[in-house]
């Protein structure tokens, strides 16, 4: 990373280098060793760290190096100095680890603090903001900023700079701490040349990250840009969605053999992602107890009968009251309202995290998928098998590999907004058989 930072030449004694979130100083040490090995002058180095224990170690470590200054401060606070270089490993802190006050402060101060942001996104924004024109930045972070929706504002910011290189590292680089790390090299210059991409298998390619709408960079980086087409999967489906989230499956999901006959009228066959397999028939072993009517209305507590008595058991009720959703919903409601009218239709099911997406048909429309399953409900149920065959085809699978997020150990994370965008081949067979449906779709698109 230090070599990449100084790729266009060594620093001058008057240069200023920043290590934000410097910890106990591994990157500062790397800069010092690089300069000694090259026999070149050392820049003035500023390490900023908020953890006093790390600050103490770093100050002692570099006490005899006059060019190094360690400051105890929050890098995301005001920084009035400007730097020629920035290098580091920003902290990965999810929004759930921040207080409500911290979240609001960051939302007011940073354009990248949108949605369920992570602090490393803000470190990018702040570091780029304190770089001098022509300055250089090299960060190692998770690769997720390339494609997650939360990082859309960061991608919009980065496209205004020159992203010189994306170097994907082995996922075990940090052991269990980080999945899919990425070293990113950026110059504070207007965008111009294409980006060099070093893939995990060692292959080197070129990509142009010029998307102006902030959409995912992953297809471009992987060379899987989507071809424009007339129709997508979302166009021919009434619903493409994640399965039902109860917030307490241990209460609402019961094994078939343990189901009380009095609860049968509330019970629906249900399945989790781990219970489906390619080519295997759907054989639900569990039932989901659903306190909702077919139209999505929550049943009144007084009308729950046996289900109400079951849920009111002391331990079960306590588990339900632990959920965050009860702050705004009745104590026995699901985390999300189940769209039963759509769920209980012929559909295709796929696991949310899988080495390769695969699709299993629920022709009877009786299975209620849980939150670890995505489901696809075509408007025309007669096309279910042909649609499944296409989704399992090499063409669709290649597209999904190029667009789905990465999870750990080489797995892919399936999401509804990705599935909806999957392009259908021209003259998709089921539409040829249903000209009325085709006309309706064309009218809708027009």
Image: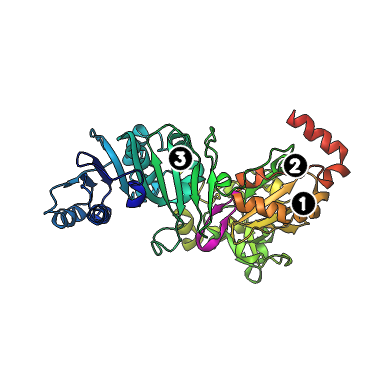
Disc 2: CA contacts within 10 A as few (<14), some (14-19) or many (>=20): many
Q: Residue furthest bottom?
A: 257
Q: Does label 2 or label 1 sit earlier along the sequence? A: 2
Which quadrant of the figure has residue 275? bottom right
Decide if residue 419 is on the left or right side of residue 194. Answer: right
**Does the segment drawn in magenta span residue 404?**
yes
Q: Nearer the viewer, residue 83 or 13?
A: 13
Q: Is residue 364 above or below residue 217?
A: below
C-alpha gap between disc 2 and disc 1: 10 Å
Question: As rendered, which of 309 and 415 lies closer to the eye?
Answer: 415
Q: CA distance from mark 2 to mark 3?
A: 29 Å
Q: Position of residue 365 (x, y in %)?
A: 75, 54
Image x and y of residue 95, in percent = 39, 46
What range is drawn magenta here? 403-414
Q: Which mark is residue 115?
A: 3
Residue at label 1? 387
Q: Residues within 10 Å of mark 3 (few under 14, many from 20)?
A: few
The figure's colour scheme reads rainbow
Helix, strand or loop status at disc 3: loop
Residue 167 spot, x, y in % from top left:
45, 52
Depicted 216 relative to depicted 175: above or below: above
């Amino acid at each position: 990373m230090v070599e990449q930072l100084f790729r266009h030449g060594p620093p001058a004694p008057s240069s200023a280098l920043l290590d934000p979130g410097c910890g106990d100083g591994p990157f500062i040490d790397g800069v010092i060793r690089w300069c000694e090995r090259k026999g070149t002058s050392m820049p003035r180095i500023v390490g900023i760290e908020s953890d006093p224990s790390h600050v103490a170690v770093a100050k002692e470590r570099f006490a005899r190096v006059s060019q190094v200054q360690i400051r105890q401060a929050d890098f995301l606070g005001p920084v009035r100095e400007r730097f020629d270089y920035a290098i580091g490993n920003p902290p990965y802190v999810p929004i759930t680890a921040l207080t409500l006050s911290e979240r609001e402060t960051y939302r007011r101060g940073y354009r990248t603090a949108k949605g369920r942001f992570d602090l490393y996104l803000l470190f990018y924004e702040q570091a780029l903001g304190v770089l001098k024109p022509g300055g250089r930045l090299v960060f190692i972070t998770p690769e997720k900023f390339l494609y997650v929706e939360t990082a859309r504002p960061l991608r919009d910011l980065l496209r205004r700079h020159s992203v010189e290189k994306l170097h994907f590292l082995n996922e075990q680089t940090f052991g269990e701490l980080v999945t899919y790390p990425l070293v990113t090299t950026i110059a504070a210059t207007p965008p111009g040349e294409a980006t060099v991409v070093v893939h995990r298998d060692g292959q080197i390619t070129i990509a142009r990250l010029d998307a102006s709408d902030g959409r995912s960079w992953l297809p471009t980086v992987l060379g899987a840009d989507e071809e424009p087409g007339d129709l997508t999967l979302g166009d021919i489906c009434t619903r493409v969605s994640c399965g039902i989230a109860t917030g307490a499956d241990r209460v609402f999901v019961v094994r078939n053999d343990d189901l009380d006959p009095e609860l049968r009228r509330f019970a629906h066959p249900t399945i989790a992602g781990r219970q489906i397999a390619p080519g295997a028939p759907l054989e639900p072993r569990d039932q989901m107890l659903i306190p909702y009517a077919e139209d999505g209305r929550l049943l009144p507590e007084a009308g729950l009968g046996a289900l109400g008595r079951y849920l009111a058991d002391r331990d079960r009720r306590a588990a339900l009251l632990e959920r965050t959703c009860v702050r705004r919903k009745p104590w026995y409601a699901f985390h999300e309202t189940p769209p039963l009218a759509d769920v209980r239709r012929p559909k295709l099911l796929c696991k949310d995290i899988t080495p390769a997406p695969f699709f299993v048909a629920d022709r009877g429309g009786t299975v209620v998928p849980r939150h670890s399953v995505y489901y696809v409900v075509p408007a025309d149920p007669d096309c279910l098998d042909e649609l499944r065959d296409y989704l399992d085809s090499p063409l669709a699978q290649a597209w999904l590999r190029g667009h789905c997020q990465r999870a750990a150990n080489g797995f892919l994370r399936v999401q509804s907004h990705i599935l909806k965008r999957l392009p259908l081949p021209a003259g998709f067979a089921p539409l040829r058989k249903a000209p009325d449906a085709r006309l309706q779709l064309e009218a809708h698109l027009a």
